[in-house]
Amino acid sequence: MWIKLWRPLLLILLMIFIGVIGFHLIEKWPFMDCLYMTVITIFTVGFKEVHALSPAGRIFTIFIILGGVGAVLFVLTKLAEIVYEGGIYKFLRRRRMEKKLGHLKDHYIICGHGRMGKEVRERLEEENVPFVVIDNNEEKLKLIKTTPKGFSIQGDASHEETLSEAGIKKAKGLAALLPTDADNLYLILTVRLLNPSLFILAKALDEEAERKLLQIGANRVVSPFKLSGLKIAQGLIRPTLVDFMDLIIRRKEIALYIEEFAVTKDSCLIDRTLKECDIRKTANVIVVAVKKPGEDIVFNPSPDIKLERGDILLVLGDEKEVSQFENTFLGAQP
């Protein structure tokens, strides 16, 4: 704040200095009389003149009034701007943000807006998925544009107050992407106290941290270095496969989607086999894999596999076909 005010304040001091020297040279008044006359002139107080002014003194006073009033108005404008931007504006912005966050649900919370957090946030924006980003660094958060489904909060992600403000109890998932493994460990412990059932994906920098993060409550742990190494190796051995997977993940160059769906209690898929459902003919999508609770993923599942409540299906198709599959098979039973 003081950095923005020092130039306007210096301008006022300069005007006072000029006024004191000018009155002393023109009217030959004592220093205190010159200072008093200068101050009441600059701030237009309207008190009676200390001594009668000579014609030259009156002309000089006119210039002091013009310059002094301009300088004071400049200072007041800067001060109001600082107060508004630094206090009132932030307060009103935070109140509006809190009101919008209060209506948010089934959203994702991104803790940490570093390189990985930025990639995750951009991906969620592309998917038009609601999210809240938490980071201590105000400069990083300035990169985020507030949208009807995207918000940012400045604060410590491991604090209960910050997580509560982000709607932790109504969130669908959380990404623990803080700079250190220790920070992510503490964050997950805090999250598990506030929302024991929340899905948590965490970043780990080494294998020991990966093991501990899983033990204390993370549902999934991602090692950026391990993933990068695997992708580089696959890129060397099977470059076309890597290109194809990138196209599916990014969803920019081709209209091909892989979506994940859970078989709910209202789904017409329950207690029916893939063959009986005839998904390919009805919705023109491919069920790439099926994951039953507590079991490994079954890729290219058999037509005779029976679907049950809680099963996860990976479905491949274009956007329209995937949407048709969701409406047809995952809605209420007829």
Image (spheres, rainbow, N blue to C red):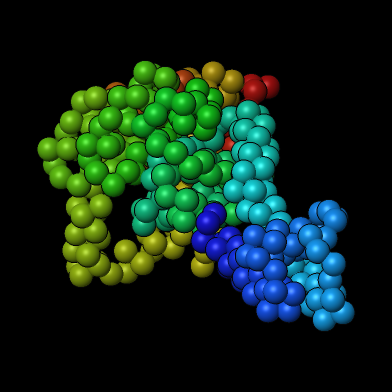
Is 227 situated left or right of 159 in this image?
left
Q: Position of residue 144 (x, y in %)?
A: 54, 54
Residue at image point 28% right, 36% down: 184
**Looking at this view, is 15 or 142 the one in front?**
15
Q: Outermost residue toward the left?
A: 208
**Looking at this view, is 139 or 245 the one in front?**
139
Q: Is residue 220 visible?
A: yes
**Looking at this view, is 254 or 115 the one in front?**
115
Q: Please determine whether, in this image, residue 131 is positioned above or below residue 191.
A: below
Q: Position of residue 56 (x, y in %)?
A: 82, 81
Q: Position of residue 271 (x, y in %)?
A: 48, 20
**Looking at this view, is 154 or 288 the one in front?**
154
Residue at image point 46% right, 59% down: 250
Query: Can you tell which quarter of the image residue 102 is in?
Result: top right
Q: Please determine whether, in this image, residue 303 is positioned above or below residue 62.
A: above
Residue at image point 67% right, 32% down: 99
Query: Can you tell which quarter of the image residue 96 is in?
Result: top right
Q: Quadrant of the N terminus?
A: bottom right
Q: Is residue 327 visible?
A: no
Q: Outermost residue toward the bottom?
A: 56
Query: Can you tell which quarter of the image residue 238 is in?
Result: bottom left
Residue at image point 44% right, 63% down: 247
